[in-house]
Amino acid sequence: MPTASFKTDLLGAIPSLRAFAVSLSQNADKADDLVQETLMKAWDKQSSFQLGTNLKAWLFTILRNEFYSQMRKRGREVQDTDGAMTARLAIHPEQDGMLDLEDFRSALDQLPPDQREAIILIGASGFSYEEAADICNCAVGTIKSRVSRARTRLHEILGVNDDSEYGPDAISTQVLGSGIP
Amino acid sequence: MNEAAATPKRPPRKRDNKDPLGANSEIARKLKQYYSSVVADEVPDRFAQLLNKLESAETPRDKG
């Protein structure tokens, strides 16, 4: 691939790479370092990228590998102590039942890393289950069960009902319910 | 009597393995909202500069 177009494609992928990196590392500075490392690795490996395949998935894979290899190098258990602390902080939805974005982010941070990355890849980054499984180097069924557990856990942390699809019914139920002593 | 008519509940679809997230759930919508707010963040210049550097370091000996 001509270098110029590879470069343009990399530039275009940066916003989503940063978003994924923030989700993994939970820290904006670390995230940008991860993205930088990813771009350098991708540049070095550009001959191994197969034209016509999904560049974004390829880059996400590099970024994810980089993240976990840094974690291992630091010899640090993945986020465990922080997770145990924050798990005790319950979050309650606003009175109108809509979740505050900051509350949501904080709930997301409390998920185990494998569940968090799965739900981000599927629910936000727009990957298929097959692509997410490739990126995480695991089976499609594993991704599905991680997403499902992540969803359940988020419901618990955020105190929203399972299956609460925010249609008119769900909202009126909440309004009625909140008025009854 | 017709029990189905008396209970307007739809059959639970939670177990639907094709869509563990539930595309219309509040969680799914918040997730997208959260993610797009991060994606919309301004990208620092350092990345464009890095790629420029990598590009200019490339192949002076081989016009490829």
Image: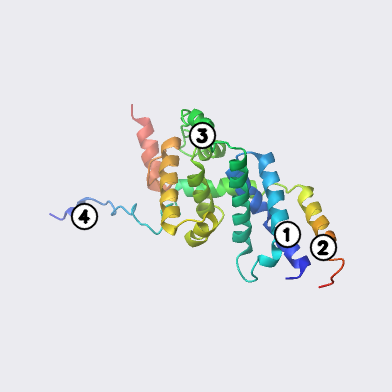
- Taking A117 as reference, is A6 left or right? right
What residue is rendered at 51% in x and 30% in y?
A86
Amino acid carrying mark 1 in the image: Trp
Task: Measure how far apart labels 3 and 1 are at the Cα level.
Answer: 33 Å
Residue hosting label 1: A43
Using a 10 Å C-alpha cutoff, classify the residue at mark 1 as few (fewer than 14 neighbours), some (14 to 19) or many (20 or more): many
**Quick one: quadrant of the C terminus of chain A?**
top left
Amino acid carrying mark 2 in the image: Glu
Q: Determine the image quadrant of residue A11.
A: bottom right
Amino acid carrying mark 3 in the image: Asp
Using a 10 Å C-alpha cutoff, classify the residue at mark 2 as few (fewer than 14 neighbours), some (14 to 19) or many (20 or more): few
Can I make out residue B6 in this image? yes
Tag 2's secondary structure? loop
Can I make out residue A159 in this image? no
* Disc marking residue A116: none
Indicate the chain on which mark 2 is placed: B
Please tell me whether mark 3 or mark 4 is closer to you in this view: 3
Task: Measure how far apart labels 4 and 1 are at the Cα level.
Answer: 63 Å
Please tell me whether mark 4 or mark 1 is closer to you in this view: 1
Indicate the chain on which mark 4 is placed: B
Task: Measure how far apart labels 2 and 1 are at the Cα level.
Answer: 10 Å
Residue hosting label 2: B58
Indicate the chain on which mark 3 is placed: A
Q: Up-down: is A88 above or below A73?
A: above
- Taking A48 as reference, is A90 left or right? left
Do discs 2 and 3 share a chain?
no
- Taking B1 as reference, is B26 left or right? right
Residue hosting label 3: A80
Q: Determine the image quadrant of residue B19.
A: bottom left
